[in-house]
Amino acid sequence: MMRTDHSIKNVCRAPSTPFGLALLGLTVAMLLNSGCVRRTLTINTEPQGALIWLNDEEIGRSPVSKDFVWYGDYDVVARLDGYETLKTNHFVKAPWYQRAGIDFFSEILYPGKIHDQRTANFALEPAVIPDRSELLERATEFRERSLFDEK
C-alpha cells in the first residue's frame, strides 16, 4: 500500500488565507519595485564649452553630464581653443550606502530610487603663445643639443 505525505502537499500549494495572500502580494510588489541607484557625474569648466573626454571617451562640451557605473578614479581631458589642454584625474568617492554589504539593501531591497549626482569643476588656463624670437631661440638650442651633444 502506498503512503501519501500530506505535509509536503500542504507546503507546495498556493496560500489561501488573507494573510498569506497579502504576504505573497507584498513580496511580489517589493521585487517588481526594487531599488535602483542612478549615478551621474557633471563636468563643468571655466570657461564653459570645452570638449570633455572621460576615460578616453568623448562625452561632449562642458557643462556635460554622464551616467557612471562605478566609483573611483576617472581620467579627465578638457580642450578649448585658446586654452591649455587639461589632463587630470578626478576621484569619485562612494557614499556610505554603497559600501560592501550595505549596497545590497540600497540596490535591491530599498523600494525607492536613489540618484547620486556628483559635480567636478575645472579651471582652464589661457594658452601662452611664445613670441617669434623666443620660439626661434628654443628651436636653435634644441637643434644644437640634438646634433652636437655626445652621449
Image (cartoon, grey):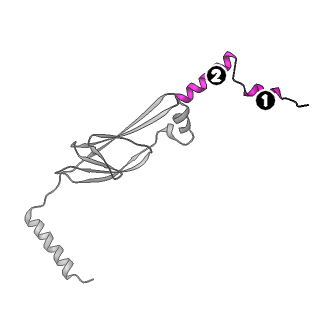
Looking at this view, is 111 or 144 the one in front?
Answer: 111
Residue 24 is inside the magenta segment: yes
Tally the marks. Answer: 2
Give yes or no for residue 126 being in the magenta stretch. no
**Which quadrant, please, contains the C terminus?**
bottom left
Q: Secondary structure at mark 1?
A: helix
- Residue wearing tag 2: 23
Left or right: where 112 falls relative to 101? left
**From the viewer's perspective, is residue 90 above or below residue 35?**
below
Left or right for 54, reference 133: right
Question: Seen from this angle, which residue lies furthest bottom?
Answer: 150
Read off the residue under disc 1: 8
Name the spot of residue 26 as percent of width and height, x first. Answer: 59, 23
Main secondary structure of the magenta stretch: helix
Q: Position of residue 144 (x, y in %)?
A: 16, 78
**Residue located at (28% from left, 47% from top):** 52
Task: Using the image, determine if residue 31 lies above or below residue 118.
Answer: above
Indicate the position of residue 8 as horizontal and vertical percent values. 78, 29
Q: Residues within 10 Å of mark 1 (few under 14, many from 20)?
A: few
Q: Quadrant of the N terminus?
A: top right
Residue at left 77%, top 27%?
9
Check the image and report above or below for 55 versus 33. Answer: below
Query: Is 146 on the left-hand or right-hand side of 58?
Result: left
Q: Quadrant of residue 142?
A: bottom left
Q: Residue at x 21, y 78 (%)?
A: 146
Range shown magenta: 4-32
42 vs 147: above or below: above
Estimate the x, y position of residue 104 in percent, counting from the top left: 55, 38
- Specify which label sits upstream in the sequence, 1 or 2: 1
- Front residue of this view, candidates 86 and 25: 25
Dot 2 amino acid type: Leu
Secondary structure under tag 2 reads helix
